[in-house]
Each structure stands twice: as C-alpha cells, then as structure tokens.
Image (cartoon, grey):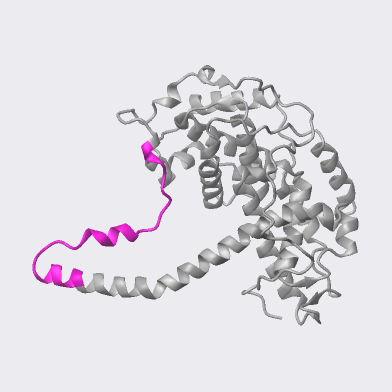
Amino acid sequence: MELEDQWWRGQLAADIYQALRYKELKLPSFKGQSPQLNLRRYFADLIAVISNHLQLCPPARHLAVYLLDLFMDRYDVTVQQLHMVSLACLLLASKFEEREDRVPKLETLNGLGCMSSMNLVLTKQGLLHMELLLLETFQWNLYLPTAAHYIEYFLSAAVHEGDLHDGWPMTSVEKTKVYMLKYADYFLEVSLQDHVFLCFAPSLVAAACVAASRLTLHLSPTWPPRLHRLSGYTWENLVPCAEKLLIAHDSDVKEDHKQKCRQPVQQQQQQQQQQDQSMYHSSGQSASVAQYLHLSGVQYPQQTLQSGLPSSHYLSQSVASLQPLPGSQHPTSQAPATSLDPKPNRSHQVSMQYSSAASCFDR
C-alpha cells in the first residue's frame, strides 16, 4: 500500500523488503493457458492507459495487470467480459494501493472517452459482482508483490557518485539520477506488456530494470556490489531477464528511428493535403476525409464485439457463466513457474558492456 514517507529510505526498509521477498515465494503460479492470451497485451495496455489518465500509482497499475493475468489463467472469459474484468481489477488494485480519495468512482470510469468506444457502461451491481468473484478467486488476498513494489527500493542505490560513465567520472549525479528514473520506469512498463516476464520473480524483474538502465546509460560497473548486497541478486541472475528488456529497448529505438525517417515524407504529404484542402474549399466542395485518418487515439478491437448488442449487454450476464479452465485451481502457494520462459534470442547477447547508445544522456 502507498505510504506517506519514503519507506525505502527508513530504518524499516530492509524488514519491509524481506517481508515482500518472503511473500513473493508464495505467489500463485501462472500457467499461460488462457484461450484469450493473445488479447492480453491489449487489455494490459487498456489498464495502463486508464491508470495513467487517472494518475494512479505504478503499484496499483501493476497489481491490476497481475490480477488480470491470474484471473484469465483460471477462467475462460469472453472478450466482452474481459473489458469489465480489466476495469474491476484496476478498481480493486487502486482500493488496495491508493488512498481512499484517489480510488476512481463509478461515474469517473463511465465518463472516460474509451468507454463509449468499447460500447460499455458499468453498473454498480455488475461491477460489485465482478469484484466479489475476483476476491473469491484470490481468496480475499490482494497482498501480491509486483516489480513496481521493489523498484523504488533498488533505485535508492542505483546511482552513486563513485560510478563512471563511459569510464569517466560523472559531471552531474543528479542529472544521472533523473535519467535513471526515466529508464527504470520505461523498462518497468516493458515488463508489464509481455506475460513472459511472469516467469521471473517480481524482485528479479525490478533489479533487472535497474541493471538494464545502467547498461543503457553506460554506467560502470554494471552491477556494483552495493546493488548486489541490496537486492541479493548477482549479475548472472539478472542476465536472462535483462536480455529480454534490452531486446525490447533495441526494437523501440529502431522503430523510433524509422518514425523520424518518415517525418520528412509525412510533412510533404501534409503540405500537399493542405494545398488540396484549400482547393476543395475554394471550389465549394467538402474537405478531403484523408485528414481524419491521421488523428491519433487508442484503437479498440471493435471487430471482436458482437453487433447489435445493447451497451450493457454483457454486464447483465451472470458471473456464473465464467467457466474455470480445465486443471485450474484457486491460487496456491507456489513459486513462479519457469516453464514459460522461451529460449533466449542469442542474437542479442547481454554482456557487461552494452553497445546501444543512450541518446538522451550526455556525460
């Protein structure tokens, strides 16, 4: 839960960290057997977008996605029901992690622009029934540590004045800390987007986010002794997870480069469109509809919804219609499963030196 003080700097920090690590050993197992697993990324992004809009804390966002993962892993849920399940997970997580005055209200959720795009209207009774089903599924236990619960503890020791940048002393420790925070948040969100990170312990994912940030910022040593002592993880423990984070980072850098290369072409197209529009207006005709194709916004998979349904159709369905998957059980005290971890992409080997330049960091 959110604390008023920075707990990771207090005298009880080590005890709280050890309590989280102990609880981590008893997290429910994730089997990745949901028939809708291919839609998991969409609903994780939906939770992230809504939580960012409502300015909820990262632990609430990560807990909501984790609840969704576990619930989908145990029930065969329709696409229509998954929208309500996602919002119910976010609401439960915010009640657990946020202060009472920051918990979203039903009117606030229904007032979101994406709700009309999803053809969805939440009702108090429908949302209450879904929350009760979620709580019963997790045996009324929402004390489930995620990577977001550890990241601030590790960030407290992520940058030290004795660290080197490209082999040279840092000119600004505070500036480095700012970039470290940005990169750590970025890698934390990357870990939220792919269910493959569920095969790692949450504390290891958080430590790998810090290690990947240090690699990207060209800080040495990559994993100093102080972080080893603080986290309990060696560099060798972090390599498999950090490798996946850095692969995603490289992919984003390449995509960003492609977007920048397309900008001159897009500018020329926009200029041409403006000229065409001015000609249409001068001749009394309507403007070209092509301009509306460039409007940004979150696209929702409307093709998966059945046509002709009223806005609150599936909300009125009984939660009893959710069928447990074969072999699924209620959460049990097991260590995170490791069978989901695919063979690492050996075309991208992570070593103590990372070649990708950190474009936003200047020594």
Q: Residue furthest front?
A: 347
Res 6 seen here: no
In the image, residue 294 lies in the stretch drawn in magenta:
yes
Q: Could you say which quadrant of the image residue 294 lies in?
A: bottom left
**Is 300 inside the magenta-drawn segment?**
yes
Residue 99 is left or right of residue 313, and the answer is right
Q: In front here: 363 or 18?
A: 363
Residue found at the far left of this picture? 283
Going 57% across and 52% down the picture, which residue do you hit? 55
Residue 39 placement (x, y as % from top left): 51, 39
Can residue 82 be seen here? yes
Highlighted magenta segment, given as a residue range: 276-303
Give the percent coordinates (x, y) of residue 362.
67, 79
State left or right for residue 180 relative to residue 120. right
Above or below, comparing residue 240 to residue 71 in the picture = below
Q: What residue is drawn where x is 70% and y is 26%?
A: 140
Q: Is residue 137 left or right of residue 177?
A: left
Q: Is residue 68 above or below residue 167?
A: above
83 in relation to 49, above or below: above
- The quarter of the image holding the C terminus is bottom right
Say if 245 sits above or below 144 in the image.
below
Task: Count the labels in the image.
Answer: 0
Please tell me which residue lies in front, 350 or 362: 350
On-image quarter of the N terminus: top right
Residue visible at 56% across and 48% down in the picture: 48
Q: Position of residue 243 (x, y in %)?
A: 71, 56
Quarter of the image where one finds residue 110: top left
Q: Is residue 255 left or right of 121 when viewed as pictured?
A: right
